Amino acid sequence: MSGGRGAFVLGPRTTIWTDRADSAVAARFARQIAPATGLDLVVKIGAGTSGSRIVFRQAAEGDTALGREGYRLQITPGVATVTSAAPAGAFYASQTMRQLLPAAVFRSALVSGTAWSMPAVTIEDRPRFQWRGAHLDVSRHFMPKEFVKKYIDLLALHKMNTFHWHLTDDQGWRLEIKKYPRLTEVGAWRSQTLAGRPQHDSAANVFDKARHGGFYTQDDAREIVAYARDRFVRVVPEIEMPGHSQATIAAYPFLGNFGDTVPVWTTWGVTPHILNPSDSTIAFMQDVLTEVMALFPSEFIHIGGDEAPKTEWKASPRAQARMKELGLSNENELQSWFTTKMDVFLASHGRRLVGWDEILEGGLAPNAVVMSWRGIAGGITAARAGHDVVMAPENYTYFDKYQSLNKDAEPLAIGGFLPIDSVYAYEPVPPELEARYASHILGAQGQVWTEYITGPKQVEYMAYPRISVLSEVLWTPRTRRDFADFSARLPAHLRRLNALDVNYRP
Ligand code: ACM
């Protein structure tokens, strides 16, 4: 980036010129800045050469410096030129232009008396990582569709490109599946929710005695996917198996190991109730994935795989017989067999399975992408074995942890302490990983688990500004990262979040 002289002042006569490929991005930029500026900028296909103008144009053939997501932005008084090889790059340039304008541009109604100017500057920019993500758990607490869109919108503003939607867990199944309606009729609702933390003696647990639930229809999911796609965010759905499945089993008891009925769970932790490893259960979950794939174009489909206690499989004659028949020596290998069934199924449809790092334990499914959450060891092992990896270590990327050591002054959270300087210091490529495997680290993502996060305002409190911090870690070259510099820029960014009504932690 280099500074120039003067500034570009947007006015009613500013015209946006664009090539055909970038026209949707150009039009979105015009719509994004319209409410606050009151400017209804004209968007024209072509290459205007006179007057106040913003020009979107394709990089020359053979200009490979920008990649698919990079851009060049040159702003001079009167002319702003965006050059990109693909619309994603043009979109990120348009987000940079929004940030170069006064923070009030993020408001949703007319702000008068402001000069809408961008400083003269030349920027060439592209992301360091291809997976720049944030996760949201909508199972422990259901989040309204409109908020999911706002969450995605904020990711896009931060040039994040992946939304990992944690749709199922013990406490609620949140996606309509046409073939199995009880997944939402039963599985989307719990009778009550634990108040405060689980007590050592579970008889002492206190509950709120209020039914909680909700789910997304398939139309809702399509709407969210389209909304995200318009903002260059891919939606990676997660359907948990074989653990974190108590709501699944509550809906269809034949999926459990003992055919007994369990309720959608009302407390937090790791339940022993996991799916049974029968052919009919495999077929059931593949049916679910068939509907999931029809809704979500993402190459990556997440099947969970974490925290599946083997107590029930050890006690179940059926599971033990299955192990024997398959020649497996332990229950971890049985989970690996289960995961591989899904892996092969997804691969046969051109998709790639993603799972939490427990999927390594009984031997890794051939095409699997590993999401390393219990630290970084799983990620290192998987990368050395030639697998792609997304880093999500809890010590650096779990944004359900406290943001202060003065926990009494904070809303109840799961524990821990993860301040923004720790997030900023996080390096996604482990120093001990040999350089030849580094390209297997696709990137990283932040996690927002919602056991103690009951609604949108609290999600924002936990997620911001930590997602802002992580977005810089994932975009900026390592050598350019500087926490002092970031800290100096943060107040200006918080003004943008204020304008967007984001309830970040001050
Ligand atoms: C996890 O936190 N159980 C992935």
Image (spheres, helix red, strand yellow):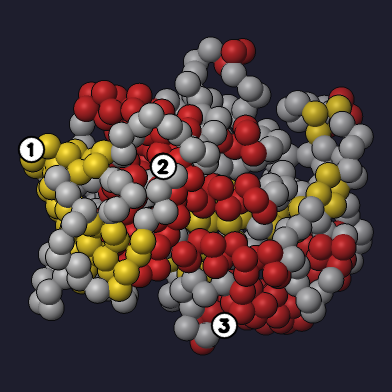
For image coordinates 48% across by 29% down, the residue present is 498
Rate crowding at label 2 as few (under 14), some (14 to 19) or many (20 or more) other CA atoms within 10 Å.
many
Measured in 3D between alpha carbons, the distance from the residue under mark 3 to the one under mark 1, in whole angstroms, is 57 Å
Rate crowding at label 3 as few (under 14), some (14 to 19) or many (20 or more) other CA atoms within 10 Å.
some
For image coordinates 31% across by 38% down, the residue present is 116
- Residue 336 at least partly seen: no
Task: Provide the residue designation for mark 1.
Answer: 5
Task: Provide the residue designation for mark 3.
Answer: 345
The label number, if any, that marks residue 381 in the structure image: none
For image coordinates 51% across by 61% down, the residue present is 228
Task: Provide the residue designation for mark 2.
Answer: 37
- Report the front residue among 106 and 294: 106
User: Considering the image in quadrants, where does the N terminus appear?
Assistant: top left
Q: Are marks 3 and 1 in contact (CB under 8 Å)?
A: no
Mark in the foreground, 2 or 1:
2
Rate crowding at label 1 as few (under 14), some (14 to 19) or many (20 or more) other CA atoms within 10 Å.
few
Question: Horizontal placement of 500 versus 6: left or right?
Answer: right
Q: Position of residue 16 (x, y in %)?
A: 29, 61
